[in-house]
Image: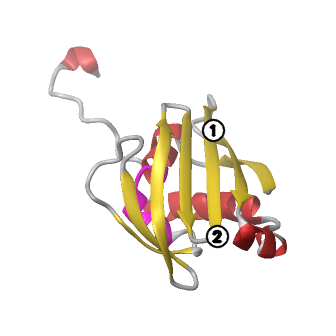
Amino acid sequence: MSTQQATRIIDETSARVREILLDAARLPDWNSAFLSIEDPGGTAADREFAIVVRPGLRGTWRYTVIEDERIDTAWKVPGFAETGTWQLRPHSTGRTLVTHGFEHRGPLARVLANAYRGVAEVRLDRLAQRATAMGPAPLPHVEDDPGQL
């Protein structure tokens, strides 16, 4: 078993970071370990998604906890399982303090332990890059009611 944790400030709102993390089908766009995740529609906790990871191993992905400031995930392929946590702490500047940690188990996890050193930091850096690439979050729609302006 191996564990890692890292923290970064992401130059985006916690709502936008949460949106990125809950878009399972797009996770392979910024997490290179994933080749594909089939999104069955929706992101309810404990709904399983089919996943393919490098080098072509098939398994399952799921969200185990979905809260405003916490998202927990779990995925597994033969010989390897990961449980992960993303904690989002909004900052008054509109940025978000994100802490990501994970734990690996299984015989393949033991073999790959050295290859996963520093991966929590890499994931946070890629999450930040993904948020930047998406551009600023859209402003909420305000009806033509002067009282709301």
* x and y percentages locating residue 14 in the rendered image: 53, 39
Residue 121 position by quadrant = bottom right
Q: Residue 87: give its label.
A: 1
Q: Which is more toward the observer, 144 or 61?
A: 61
Q: Residue at x 47, y 36 (%)?
A: 66
* x and y percentages locating residue 58 in the rendered image: 47, 75
* x and y percentages locating residue 90 in the rendered image: 60, 32
Q: Which is more toward the observer, 56 or 116?
A: 56
Q: Residues within 10 Å of mark 1 (few under 14, many from 20)?
A: many
Q: Is 107 placed above or below 55 here?
A: above
* x and y percentages locating residue 82 in the rendered image: 63, 57
Residue 96 position by quadrant = top right
Farthest residue, direction top: 147
**Magenta residues, start to end:** 21-29
Q: Is residue 27 rendered to the left or right of residue 10?
A: left
Q: Residue 79: give its label.
A: 2
